[in-house]
Image (tube, rainbow, N blue to C red):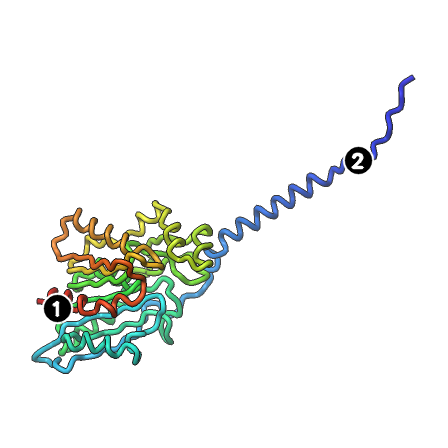
Amino acid sequence: MFAQLPNSSKKFNSTKPNKLIKLSLLLLILLLLGSQLPLLITTFVPLSNQGKVLSKLYLPATANAANPAPLLVILGGSEGGMGMTGDRRAAVRQGYLDAGFALLVVGYFGLPGIPSGLDRIELSGVLDVIENTRSNPVVDAEKLSVLGVSKGAELALLLASRSAQISTVVAVVGSEVVFGSPEWYSTSSSWSWQGQAMPFVPFSWRSALPLVQGDFRRGYEIAMQNQQAYQRALIPVQQMQADVLFVSGTADELWPSSEMSDRMMHRLQQHQYRYRYQHLKIPGGGHGGLARQYQPEIIEFLVESQR
């Protein structure tokens, strides 16, 4: 006679593993969707007014058809708009005008009638307004300088690498690569060329966290660790046919502009660049205010390059 085994008080629940599998699959799907969400949003966010810009031309008192003024194009950064046209920048504007430059301030996003955000901005639109201004009889079409600050410096270097008409570039706290659009929804490029988005260094989830926390430099440094994207996004500064002045601060809190400017200087040297190139590195300088603080040095470089 066999002893009767006691009834187990715990019964095996065959539905529990199935629930765990379903939950795991759901979590995986949510993670995959989350990782692609910015790209999906970017794909479906309509772009408007691409290739359109606004501009305002200031002329020095000495400019006329018999004495045309060299043209200086001003490109602002990720703040958008046309800050150089405001009353607060009147003294800065006057400094360039007193030096004899015709001043063309270009707004490429953030104003009515032009792109609303810094997302896949078409370079040809900026080049077109510059070319139209060069046809002005009081502007010296052979002497064209471009000065950009931050994202505007990124743009200035891109323009000069594609236009042989630009004879001088001043890149203040600029970048050596194209970075992703800073728009909150975007994993797209900041710039386009002839209708095609340019290769860029994207912001990953890992780099986005410091950005959200306000540690912008750390966010950019993490993004730059993507070496494959970084190499594709390098701005071909060696293709420029212009004198170039890099201005940077060693304590730049947004991105490592000094280190990137040093690397561009090294790249120009490696390619035996035949134009003048100089790096004005400000010890302890931050990301903002350098174009204003070092305007005399910038003007000196511009004037010498136009001789």
Between marks 1 and 2 in the image, the one whose residue lies nearer the viewer: 1
Residue 229, x across and y down, in percent: 35, 48
Rendered image: mark on residue 22: none
Q: Quadrant of the C terminus?
A: bottom left
Q: Earlier in the sequence, mark 1 or mark 2?
A: 2
Q: Nearer the viewer, residue 67 or 86?
A: 86
Query: Three-letter amino acid code at disc 1?
Result: Val
The N terminus lies in which quarter of the figure? top right
In which quadrant of the rendered view does residue 89 lie? bottom left
Q: Could you tell me residue 283's position as x and y percent? A: 26, 58
Amino acid, disc 2: Lys
> Of 153 and 293, which appears nearest the observer?
293
Q: Is residue 307 visible?
A: yes
Residue nearest the viewer, comparing 154 with 15: 154
Write the residue at 22% across / 70% down. 73
Can residue 43 be spotted in the picture? no
Extreme residue in the top direction: 1
- Asked which secondary structure carries label 1, the reply is helix
Whole-angstrom CA distance, mark 1 to mark 2, is 88 Å
Name the residue carrying label 2: 11
Asked where in the image residue 97 lies, by quadrant, the reply is bottom left
Counting the numbered discs, the total is 2
User: Element under label 2?
Assistant: loop
| Mark 2 surroundings: few (<14), some (14-19) or many (≥20) residues within 10 A | few
Q: Position of residue 102 (x, y in %)?
A: 18, 75
Residue at the disc numbered 1: 303
Residue 1 vs 9, above or below: the answer is above
